[in-house]
Structure formats: C-alpha cells, structure tokens
Amino acid sequence: MNRCFVNLAPYIALVIIAAVITGCANVMPLSVKVQNADRKFEQAQGMTIRADTPENRKTDLAKRKELYDTALAGYLEIIAQDPNGKYATYSHFQAAAIYKKRFEWDKSTEHYQAIVDIAPAGFLGGRAKSSIADIRKNRDVIKDNRRTYQNHAPLSKDLAMRAKEATAPEDIELYNQQAQDSRDKAVRALYDEARAYQTLGNSEEAIKQFERVVAEFPEHRLAPQAQFQVGNIYFYELYDYIGGWPAYIKVIEKFPDSYEASDAETLLKETETTLTEIAQDQADIKKYTNQKALDYIQAGRDVLPSDLYVAGYADRIAQNFQNIGSGWVKMRNYPAAIAAYRKLAENLSYKKFHAADALFRIGDLYQKDGQYQRAIAAFEDMLDKAPESTWRDEAVYQQAVCFRAVREFEKAYDAFKAYMSIDKEGKYYREAEQIVRQYELDQDGDGFKFYVEQEAGTSDKDPNDNPDVKKQQAEAAEAAGGM
C-alpha cells in the first residue's frame, strides 16, 4: 500500500524553482540532485552572519535564506519524484533540518514522521524519532518555563518589597528567603528556556533569553554562565566572531571574578591567534592566485587547475589550504574546514598527495560530526579519485564503521572484509576480524547470518523471526490493507 506521507502541495513553488535552476530536472540522476542540494545546504550552514552593521547582517541573512531555499527545493523535488526511493528518507531528514532551523517545527515534525513511516527501523528512522521527541519536549520546556518566569519574577519583587517594609526581624528574614527562592526559580526558568531554544536551533531567541538573564539578574550565579553561552552561540553555532567577541568581553568586564571570565580570556587569546593565522594563509593564497585565470573563470571560460596559481607555488598553496582547514577545525567550524579542504582537492587535483589528504579529511570531519552518510560518500570519493593514497586503508575501515552506524550491515560486512584483505597488519585488523566473525554467526540456525538479520531488523535468536517471514508478513499486511 503506497501512502503519501507529507503533503507536498505547499512546496510546489520551491520544486518549480529547483526545476528552473537545474534545467532538465527529470533527466538528472537523483544522486546528482542530492549532491547539488547538499552543496547548497553546506554553503548555507557554513555562512558567517556578519553583525558589524545592520546592512551586512540583512545581506548575509538573505543570502543564507536563498541557499537554504535552493537546497530545500532540491530535497523536496527528490521526495516528489521518488517518494519511497533510497534518497527519500535522507531528503526528508535534510528538509526537516532546514525547517527546524527556521523554527517551523510543525513542518519539521512532518518530515521526521515521514521517515519513521517509511523506514522506522533504519538509522534515520531512529534519529527522526529522537528529533520528534526533542522538538515536543523542548517546546513544552519553553512553555512551562515561560509560565514559571511570569509567575515568579513579579512575585520575587513583591516579596522583596515586603521585606523592606517589614519591621519584625523574623518577617524580614522570611520575606527575603521567599524572595530569593522566587528569584532563583525565575532566573532558572529564563536560563532553561534559553537552553531549550538553543537545542531547537533557534540561536537568536536563545541569545535573547540568555541576555535577559544577565540584564534582569546580574548578581545571580547563572548570569556569567548565561553571558558566556551568548559568546558560545555566536562562535560555535553562528560562526560570527565579530558578534561573539564583545559577548566574551562582557563576561570578563562584568564578572571579573568568575570562572567564566578566566575561560573567556583564554578563549579569546587562542581565537585571536587562530583567526590571524587563517587570515595570513588566506592572504597568501590570494597573493599567488593567477588573476588572469580568475578573469577567465568569471567570463565563463574553462581554466585548468594547474593554471589557477602562479607557477612554482602549488605546494605552498596546498599547505595554506591545509592550515586553513586545520584552523577552522580548532574553531569547531566544520563547514568552513570542509570548504577549505574541498577547495584544495578541486583546485589542486593534480597534486595527488595533497588532494587525497584533503578528500580523506572531508570524510573524517563528516564522520566526527555524526554525518555518516556524507562521510560514506566522501570516503568513496577519495577511494575513486586516489585509490593509491596512503589513506586508502583507513578510508576503507572508516567507511565500514559508518555503514555500521547507519545500520547498512551488509555493506558494513563487505567493507570490513575488504579492509582485512588489504591491511593484514593494520591497527584495526583485529577489531575488523571480530566484527566479521560476529556478523557471520547464525545463532538460531535459520540460514540467515547475523548481519542479514540485523539489516532486516529481525532476531538471530528466534528461527521464526527472520527476513523471509518478515517479508511475507509485510506482503500480507499490504494485501489486506489494499482490500
């Protein structure tokens, strides 16, 4: 029985945009469409929203929205074209992430639910269930804490006034204690509301609530923590170092004796060094870039990668890109790091060693960020383009780990066996061997190995629960539903 999981009617305009942008949309393979949408998503995710002037902020926000619009249109087009295909669940997941960033939580939940309906036992199905639960939980947290704040903030002021007006020492002490208790509940409610917004990806609202904690309760122990969190959001979620810098300075100036002030001071010193080094490497690349080649590219003409930079400086440029990528990793700005490594791999593709290293690091960063499907694709890209690289064995093994993480156990099994065949003395050999042995078990003797049962979501301890039985049950249920 074919079900329509998400009402796509409201999104037709976005799909039309994608078709116009990509041209003959139906001719393009879905895998290429996913790659195109992912590129736009990455560009939007890695953008720095400048806060130095209102004009720059407005311009950057509009540009980021345009990138997300294009990515969203691509994902929705894939869903509409092949709603039950292999790319549908991934596209739903990405669409849900975009809507979540825009605080359109109902639409986000729709797409997460579509994943659960299509593949409840899969990796994305599990993440979608968790995301739905997180959205519901944090929306409730916001409502509950807002109510708590609205009750206790005025109550604490009223009780403090009564303490001032009271004459009996025992009444003064009682009112002061009650006022402090209400104040604690109010400030904790504001702080927890801010954290809930942060968890939901609503950075601007989170900043606003943290700043209210500082403004309304500057003497409270949570005030320096709240101000420090403002800086963290700017630095590590918005990648806005201009906006984040003064936020940390406020920690140092307003709360000089706090632990957060010491942490902020150290952080700013390290950040200044890292950003200065990145800027120097960027300037070096610009210095040795062939301006004529750039002019040709802007004019729409093809340019060989070897002509992009001044002759004799390719190795130096490669090192610059590697330094930039490493610097962004220090700043936990993975999108910018990936962009630097990708640029190295594309612009210096003829420098095989450097290009292969960059391609591996892209996969490694995706894996560390929990983006296992992108990591799989990135490792595959490296293996295709640089099969003789010194990173080959590591890439094969890490790709196997990622396949296991996304519950593609058959591919994981094949990848672990491939690793064992090419790196018999490798550091992961024993671990890979143990995994392969486990995957080859058939504990219930039903003829299906453990990894096959895992892939199907059946038990290897019950012979009556196996992939064939599950398939027959699904076919029977679908036939009954269609009657």
Image (tube, rainbow, N blue to C red):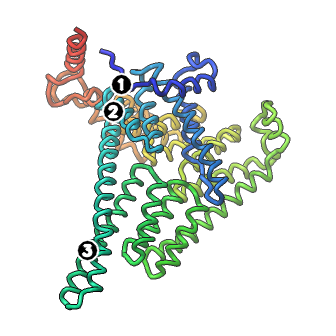
Q: Residues within 10 Å of mark 3 (few under 14, many from 20)?
A: few
**Residue at image point 23% right, 81% down:** 175
Q: Against 274, is 439 above or below?
A: above
Do the residues bearing badges 2 and 1 touch, measured as CB atoms within 8 Å? yes
Q: Earlier in the sequence, mark 2 or mark 1?
A: 1
Tell me the SS state at disc 1: loop
Question: Which disc, if any, is residue 181?
Answer: 3
The kind of residue tagged 2 is Gln
The kind of residue tagged 1 is Phe
Q: Quadrant of the C terminus?
A: top left
- Disc 2 from disc 3: Cα separation: 41 Å
Q: Against 369, is 176 above or below?
A: below
In the image, is 394 to the left or to the right of 410?
right
Q: Earlier in the sequence, mark 2 or mark 3?
A: 2
In the image, is 455 to the left or to the right of 268?
left
**Residue at image point 48% right, 62% down:** 232
